[in-house]
Image: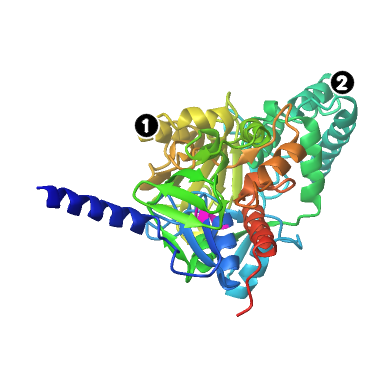
Amino acid sequence: MGCMKIFIKLLLLIVSLQSFSVFADSEQTKILVVGAGISGLGAAKELHDSGYEVTVLEARNIIGGRIYTDRSLGFPLERGANWIHGNKLESNRLMLMKEELGLKTNITSLSVADNFKLFDKNGKIINLSEDDLEKIEFRIGLTAYIASYIYPTATLEDVIGFLKKIRLISFAPNVVFQAILQNLELSAAEDSKNIPIGTLVAEAEYMENAGNDEEVFGGFDQFTNHLSKNLDIKLNTPVTKIDYSSKNVKVFSSDNIYIADAVVVTVPLGVLQKNLIEFVPDLPEKKKEAIKNINWGNVNKVIFKFPYNFWGDAKTFFIERDDRHAFSTWLSNEVMVNEPVIYSFFSGDFSRNMEKKSDDYIIEEAMKSLKIAYGNDIPEPESYLITRWGLEPYILGSYSAPGHNQDDLKLRTELANQIENKIFFAGEATSVNEYGFSHAALYTGLREAKKIKEIYPIKPQ
């Protein structure tokens, strides 16, 4: 019996040593990347191609993070990221990758003035001249710009309310302003009442020079699939603890312990806010404050495939409802998939509440909007997809958002700061000026890879 106990102890010791021996036989600099979204894959590929030994630990059973192309209906539909935003930006690495991979795209727009059909509560189509739209945009834009200096905590709703009060935009029906507000909310992943006008003005100036948005034929996941090639990616491996108290960093998953020289943490902000990963020692107070205070947004979609197209050639349309968030904005996906598919996406508190509802409830509410515009005789959807990003256990939301009393420059800069040259942080929330965009997330991964290459240069052979 004594021999058996000794044997078991030795066996356990061997297993333990094997668990701690990941990377141990190599003299290469060892890097762990936590998260296989586009920022993590971008960092991992850059380091791998530069000669580092890299392993990516991904909690879910698929790569891509919030880039998720669903092909369950027989053609590619985007549950997550839809567009390459800002096709004129020199910093947009996705545009370079698009050219490298020879991907075909479709230029799209969510502008109220561009292919946007407006329906009021009674299903009446609202037509505005281009001159009227330009007047509205100019007066709102000028007033917002002035307000950003004299009343920076004002919101776009405050600006529109003021202009209505002094009758400078009284010639336009209410549905126009509902559509403008909804457009802002979908871009920001938050309710407009929570977005200060100063942030909106800065974003408008940024987008002015950013160019158009492009959808990718064949699926947005072609980017992440390309980045993942030749990488060591361990799926179904949620990280529970990162111990950086000694020279090497130990990263704990449910069934293994990994050891590396440095770790790149690229998990969504929602995961950090929920403290799903324990850090030893605890994160610095400034880092924890940044994690806590950056606003975490929520956007979801309902996607319908119908037996035929009943909406005509409309590319995008807005349907006025008492609650403007209630499946008001719709886009046709027919050009992209050659199927009668449209989808609605919704954000903020409405999105968070809708996640808790049943599929049947969501479908019924969404169809109410479509019946206002196109009548009660429209067909029921043949199939559908509904996203619930806030309930995804290792994502818990969509992307970071602006907010009141939020110093984005300070908070996001702090979130991006590395700790002791061992723990590095990437992901769209660590991007100061371009958060919320896929190209920004990719850039942050490349940014942290560059830091690591400077701190841990490859030794010449």
Q: In the image shown, does 286 or 318 lie closer to the viewer?
A: 286
Mark 1 Cα-neighbour bin, 10 Å: few <14, some 14–19, many ≥20: few
Is residue 271 left or right of 212 when viewed as pictured? left
> Vertical placement of 157 versus 418: above or below?
above
Q: Position of residue 460 (x, y in %)?
A: 64, 78
Indicate the quadrant where residue 379 lies. top left
Q: In the image shown, does 425 or 440 lie closer to the viewer?
A: 425
The residue most toward the top is: 165
Write down the region rendered in magenta: 33-38
Q: Position of residue 260 (x, y in %)?
A: 51, 57
Q: Tag 2 or tag 1, which sits nearer the N-term?
A: 2
Q: Position of residue 14 (x, y in %)?
A: 29, 57
What secondary structure is marked by label 2? Answer: loop
Q: Amino acid at mark 1?
A: Ser
Is residue 154 left or right of 271 when viewed as pictured? right
Residue visible at 75% across and 47% down in the picture? 433
Of badges 1 and 2, the one in the foreground is 1
* Residue on which disc 2 sits: 166
* Residue on which disc 1 sits: 358
Q: Amino acid at mark 2?
A: Ile
* Residue 123 within the segment the image draws in magenta: no
Q: Is residue 305 visible?
A: no
Residue visible at 65% across and 48% down in the picture? 420
Q: In the image shown, does 299 or 413 lie closer to the viewer?
A: 413
